[in-house]
Amino acid sequence: MRGYNPEAAGWLLWFSRRAVCRLQSIDRNELELMSISRFFHEPQGLWYHGGAVAYALLAYAFGLAGLFAHHWVINIVATLLLAHGMTIAAYMIHECGHNTVFSSNQVNASLGHFLNWICGACYGAFEDIRYKHFRHHLDNDDAVWWEYAPFFQRHPLVYRLTRWLEWLYIPAHELIMHGMMVFTAFLIPARRDQRRRNVVVILLRGGVFFTVLWLAPRAALLYLLAYVLMIHLLRLMDSTHHDYGPNPTLFVDHPPSRFGGRETEQEHTFSCPLSLRCEKLNWLVLNFGFHNAHHLRPTVPWYRLPAYDREKLGSDPRRYIPFRSQLKMYHRFRVCRVMHEGGPYDEQQSAMGQDYLEACRAVRNYGGNAVSFLTSF
C-alpha cells in the first residue's frame, strides 16, 4: 500500500492504547472519588473538610513533636502550629455539631468525639457540646447551667485574682471554665452517669501530661502555652458575636424566650470576619467570623459561608464589626470584661441590637468571656 508506514502505525496504535488506558484510569479515579464523596454532606466537603481535618491532625502531630526539640526556634514554630491545629480541630467540632461534614449524624458525632481529644474537650461527651449549642441556636440565647457572675460575687478573692491574671494576658476566666470541664460529671448532677468515663479520661490525659512534665518539662509547659493560645483565639472570635449574656436554662425544658426566639435571631447576632478584602484569610478560623450567615442557616458548611453571607445579607461593610476594632476591645478591656465593670464605658454594656453593633465598631463595648462552645455547661 502506497504511503503505508508500519513503524508510524505501530506508534499510533501504542499511543491510542495508552490514551484509552489513561482515560480508563481517570474514570476509575473519578468513580472512587464519587463513591467517597457521597458520604459527605456535600461532595466538595471531601476536599474542604478533609483538608481542614488533615491540617489539624498534621499540625497537632508535628507541633507536639516540635515541642521536644532542643532548638528554641523550632519550639516557637511548633507551639504556634500546635495552637492553630487545635483551634481548627475545635472549629471542626463545631461543624460536626451541625452535621455539615458527613451525611450521617452518627459519623459526624464519631469525628466530633475524636477531635475532642485533640483540643482537650474530651472530659465531657460530644453530645453535650452539640446539645448546648443547639439550644443556643433554637433559644436565640446563651443557655447555661453555671453562671460566673454569682460565683465571682461570692468569691471576691478569686475575682481579684482572675482580673490580675487577665491583665497579664492569662485567660483565667476561660481557664476556670475549662478546669470545671475536666470534672464536669462530678459537678453537674444531670451528668452523673458519665463519672466512670470522666475518671478514665482524667487518668489517661493526666497520666500522659505529668509523665511528660517529669521527663521533658519544657515540652509540657510549651503545650500549656499552645493551649492558652488556642483559648485566646477561640475567645477572641466569640467575644462579640451576640449582645446577650448567660441564661441558666440549659436543663429547663421549653424555657420562655428572652428575645423572641429565632424570629429576632439576626438582631442579636453580629459578624466579625478577619478580612473582607482577602476572604481566604478567614480560613484561618474556618470563616467563623461570618456569624450572621451561620445563624441564618446553620447547615451551611464553613467554606460556603462568605458567599452565602453576601447572597442573603448583602455586602455593606457597616454591618460588620471590623477585626481591628475587635482586637482593640480584646486588648483594652481584658480586665473589665470579666464582669463588665470597672471600665470607661460601663453604662454602654447593656446595649442591644444596632446600639451594640455601633458600640463595638467604635470600641466602646467590652465583649464577652466564657461563651466557648467547647464548655458545654
Image (cartoon, rainbow, N blue to C red):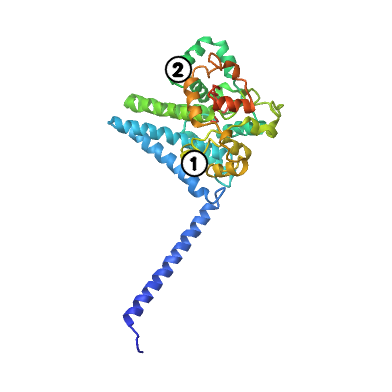
Mark 1 residue element: helix
Residue placed under numbered mark 2 in the picture: 167
Badge 2 amino acid = Trp
Looking at the picture, does residue 176 appear above or below residue 116?
Answer: above
User: Which label number is shown at residue 279?
Assistant: 1
Q: Residues within 10 Å of mark 1 (few under 14, many from 20)?
A: few
Measured as percent of width and height from the top left, residue 88 is found at 47, 37
Q: Residue at x 42, y 68 (%)?
A: 21
Badge 1 amino acid = Glu
Measured as percent of width and height from the top left, residue 173 is found at 50, 20
Query: Looking at the rendering, in which quadrant would you find the C terminus?
Result: top right
The first of marks 2 and 1 along the sequence is 2
Separation of residues labelled 2 and 1 (CA atoms):
32 Å
Q: Residue at x 70, y 34 (%)?
A: 263
* Quarter holding residue 194: top right
Measured as percent of width and height from the top left, residue 120 is found at 47, 30
Measured as percent of width and height from the top left, residue 115 is found at 49, 37
Mark 2 residue element: helix
Q: Residues within 10 Å of mark 2 (few under 14, many from 20)?
A: some
Tell me if I can see residue 159 in this picture.
Answer: yes
> In terms of depth relative to the viewer, which is nearer, 362 or 310?
362
